Image (tube, rainbow, N blue to C red):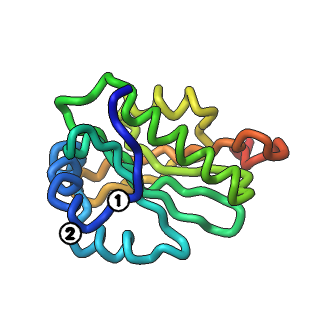
Amino acid sequence: MTWVIRRAERRDLPEILRIEETQFPEPWTRGMLIDEMSNVATRRYTVAVEEGVVLGYLGVMFVLDELHVNTLGTAPEHQGRGVATALLTEAFADAAERRMVRATLEVAVSNARAQRLYHRFGFAPVGVRRRYYERTGEDALVLWADLPGAPAGGPTLAP
């Protein structure tokens, strides 16, 4: 690994937006990201940077004792290098320091690559949000994971 992970800053927005637009059919807007990054009490945005270039980013939200993954993206030319894995690993370490016990996120049902990544972090499906993505009408899987060191027993699928 030749990059560093640090807090995202406003100067990173053009590269974060570029990644958002290449990765998602409904990318976050500049205004949305500024609002998120400004809310430091309940949000945390980080970037993986190599030689001044943003390789990827992660935005999370803290809700009570839960970590919610808002957005995660890696520049297409840097995929497969472990950037997203490093960003999630660092976020999980921060969540442990904050005494978070579970993590959750939504992921498009068609995004098998992201689902494999999340599975490696212990995420499992607990439900489906029908037509979650407005532009495409695609469903989202709701995933949950117990964070390392947390008591087991997160949400489960209803029978």
What residue type is disc 2 on? Arg
Relative to 12, residue 92 above or below: above
- Image quadrant occupied by the C terminus: top right
Query: Residue lying furthest right in this view?
Result: 151
As helix, strand or loop, the secondary structure at mark 2 comes to helix
Is label 2 in contact with label 1 (beta carbons under 8 Å)?
no
User: In the picture provided, is 86 more to the left or to the right than 144?
Assistant: left
User: In the picture provided, is 158 more to the left or to the right than 9?
Assistant: right
Q: Sort mark 1 into few (<14), some (14-19) or many (20+) by Cα contacts within 10 Å.
A: many
User: In the picture provided, is 2 more to the left or to the right than 77?
Assistant: right
Q: Position of residue 20 (x, y in %)?
A: 22, 51
Residue 115 versus residue 44: which sits nearer the camera?
44
Relative to 107, residue 42 above or below: below
Q: Which residue is depicted at the point 34% across and 77% down?
A: 35
Residue 131 versus residue 28: which sits nearer the camera?
28
Relative to 65, residue 73 above or below: above
Locate residue 37: give its quadrant: bottom left
Q: Which mark is residue 110?
A: none
Q: Which residue is mark 2?
A: 30
The nearer-to-camera label among 2 and 1 is 1
Q: Position of residue 78 (x, y in %)?
A: 23, 30
Q: Which residue is mark 1?
A: 8
What residue type is disc 1 on? Ala
As helix, strand or loop, the secondary structure at mark 1 comes to loop
Q: Position of residue 44 (x, y in %)?
A: 47, 62
Q: Which residue is depicted at the point 59% across and 39% down?
A: 125
Q: Position of residue 34 (x, y in %)?
A: 29, 73
Q: Sort mark 2 into few (<14), some (14-19) or many (20+) by Cα contacts within 10 Å.
A: some
